[in-house]
Amino acid sequence: MKRRKRKKARRARPDEVFGNEALTVARFGKDVVWQSHLTAEQLAELQAKQAEAFDAVVAEIDSLVIGIATQVSQLPASQLLHRAWWELAARHMGVNAEADVGPEDALAMRMVDYIQSIIASVPPAPVVKPEVTEEDWNQLRESVDALFMKLNTSYQICRTAKALKEDPALDLKFEEFFFKAQMYWCNVRGERYQVLEEAHLRDLFAPHSDVMEEMFGISADTFVDEIMKIVASLTKGIQIAFEEMESFRQDSLNAVTTKVQTGQYGNKTFEEIFENVIAENNWGDRRERVGSLWIGLDLYDVRKLTILSNDLVDELTWGPGEDTDFFANGPFPGWPLRVWPTFKRPFICIDGRACCFDLHSLCDNIYRIMSRVIRRKKPDYQETWNVRQQAVAEELPLAQLAALLPGSTVFKSAYYKWIPKPGHTKKEWCETDGLVVYDDHLFIVESKGGAFTHTPPATDFEAYISSLKTLLLRPATQGQRFLEYLNSAESVELYDADHNAIGLLCRTDFRQVTICTVTLDPFTEMAAQAQHLGRLGINVGSRAIWPISVDDLRVYSNVFSSPLEFLHYVEQRNAAFASELLELDDELDHLGLYLKHNRYADYAQERFADAGATINFSGYHSAIDKFFSERLHDPTFPCPLRQDAPERFIEILEILAGSDRKGRSRLASYLLDLSGDGRKDISECIDRELREQLGRGRPLAFSTVGGLDIGNTTLVYVGDDAIRNAKVSVRLAREHMLIAGERERLLLELTYADNQLRDVDWQWVRMEDISSEELPELQAGAEKLRQIRLTTDKKTRRKIGRNDLCPCGSGKKYKKCCLRL
């Protein structure tokens, strides 16, 4: 008998502590706790100084921007971006996870994307220097570093202090979201894992293939092929350059060696022989190509890399100084808080060649850029684009969920009659984008294909909030409306668009109902905190919702191989919705926390409920980042992302995943709720039974009690001829339930042959199912079992401690149980 303990909140010792009179920072593994020690008077004094410094900070940033623009205009753009890209590529060679990106790595990215934006928006000076010297480069790099450091820290701190001075009632939670939105805008790039880019682009562009052929003479598939050629050059450019150089070196050296050995060139020098070999083999272009890969622009030249038409390339390319918006009159001219030119066109014309240096600007924005190009050039396609885009937005989540949950029942565009909005009384036909049914889980899927706003939050936070309402609040409200309909009767009808009945759902069939709001555009930095967005006027209610992007579902499809483990994650994700402690910046932080801590909302509550400080759960998706980095290099690389569990435990889950028995998800969830020790206990008990049962001649039940309110009685049967006695098993489980004082208990029966699990059977034994006639006999049996356990335990140890678990199996301490008898 094992007791499943409910963990109690405990004060843990931090691994590291840093601090001064004003602040303490403590690290608990990956979790960081921040706590201020300033008094109210000290804080007010500090904020007053910061508010006073605001104008000076703005002037410093303006000066930095002007200085950067002036210097860039005087330097050769090709050399600037060539060096910037090579430094970025060199720094990223050892980076496999977001947590590995340090300040120097971030600066290397800004030297590509921000400098390209400056080149696109500032005309070259009348006199441009012939080369970028070390002094020029270091000065420019220091200026860009200072700009982003000041923008991300001093400016934001002083701006908030000034806003608080002007409005003492300023909502600081609202202000925090405003700050985060600006930080994401200026600093965060890379919306999805690179290995998933191609599938993403193919799915989104496929519906528009006909109009792309009409306008640019290229199908959607071919267009994506060409974009991926650019991606390959930017990600594998160093490898490509090295391989071509090494191939040329070997071929030319072999040819020269042959000429020397045959004496064909007499006393000519090596250089003369080399030049003759180049001429004889027509390798001049090849040599030039190798040189251009290393010191020229061939790695970035869009027309050399692709077959994209000239007019299409022109639509995607800025000339130097062509963008007039970035430095136009108004707030923040040239600041990273504006719309960067790279967000609008990914290519830049350098020395007459359309070049792509910025991978993230290309991949993050190409779909929306092409959308704007096509609709501008063909205005009558606007509505068709929207209809096709929404169709994709509705189809992709259902396809991804169906892949995650093989054998599920999917209803696409289900109609029902219900009250459409609060305040209305008349029922009308309503639609839900999709329903996915798997065992006792129901997913209510509401999708939005619209774009998240591309206006900067610094100048139009209202538009930012409006986008959140459109892409998050509206589908959440629609999902809750269907849930109201589902709860309105014992069973409800589903209809197609013509109002023909297509299905029937019973609320009691579902242990878990998940409202899943899905978008094409990823905005998981905010969506991951959906329950905390009430301050922005985005009140999604107290009922858990799961806001994700199509990209997130693609990640899950690559991570979860078991539908039951995926469903358990969804249960924990829903539980996290109610946690005030979990304010995560990324959907994948939820996944990382789950993989590490299982019931991670409970983990946060147990560890930090009384911390009284700001908690930063960071670095939890590093293992996920590293896995997808491996997949980029090897598409067959197996996924290692799974919670720790013994093999015997995993065997049970795999048998359940291959079953179609109703209720398998609840059993899997019960087992997966167990801690690492609980999983180990079950595995060890199974192994012991497999070793000892044949000698004993009969199965010996083992059980857990306490903790999660529902204990379990487990029996292992060994051999093909093992005989199960269902009546005896149920009686034993009921006796265990009576001893433990439970209302419900799991009876789990496992059949093995040749040391392999062959069958899993289970039932939930409930007190309410025991008749008054059966109860006295079961109580007598339970008492007899209690006495046997006490006697056996006393024989094996000299004394039972008062605070020891009572050996009777009640789950209580001995002093509060059988010591009293």
Image (cartoon, rainbow, N blue to C red):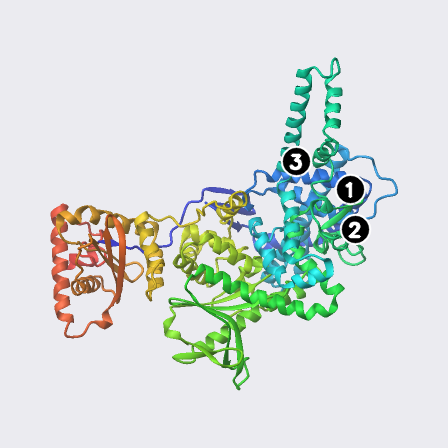
Quadrant assignment, res 655? bottom left
Q: Which residue is mark 3?
A: 241
Q: Where in the figure is residue 298, as x and y percent of width and height?
A: 72, 40
Q: Would residue 514 be found to the left or right of residue 134 on screen?
A: left
Q: Secondary structure at mark 2?
A: helix
Q: Where in the figure is residue 221, as x and y percent of width and height?
A: 63, 56
State the residue at coordinates (65%, 43%): 234
Q: Mark 1, mark 2: which one is toward the viewer? A: 1
Quadrant assignment, res 85? top right
Q: Mark 3, mark 1: which one is toward the viewer? A: 3
- The one nearer the camera, 428 or 774, is 428
State if disc 2 and disc 1 touch (CB < 8 Å): no
Q: Which mark is residue 121?
A: 2
Sequence-first disc among 3 and 1: 1
State the residue at coordinates (50%, 73%): 480
Sequence-first disc among 2 and 3: 2
State the residue at coordinates (87%, 40%): 127
Q: Where in the figure is residue 756, as x and y percent of width and height?
A: 27, 50
Q: Secondary structure at mark 1?
A: helix
Give the residue type at disc 2: Ser
Q: Secondary structure at mark 3?
A: helix
Sequence-first disc among 1 and 2: 1
Q: Residue furthest toward the top?
A: 267
> In the displayed structure, would residue 781 be above or below residue 4?
below
- The one nearer the camera, 621 or 181, is 621
Q: Which residue is mark 1?
A: 77
Q: Where in the figure is residue 614, as x and y percent of width and height?
A: 52, 53
Q: Would residue 412 be found to the left or right of residue 2 on screen?
A: right
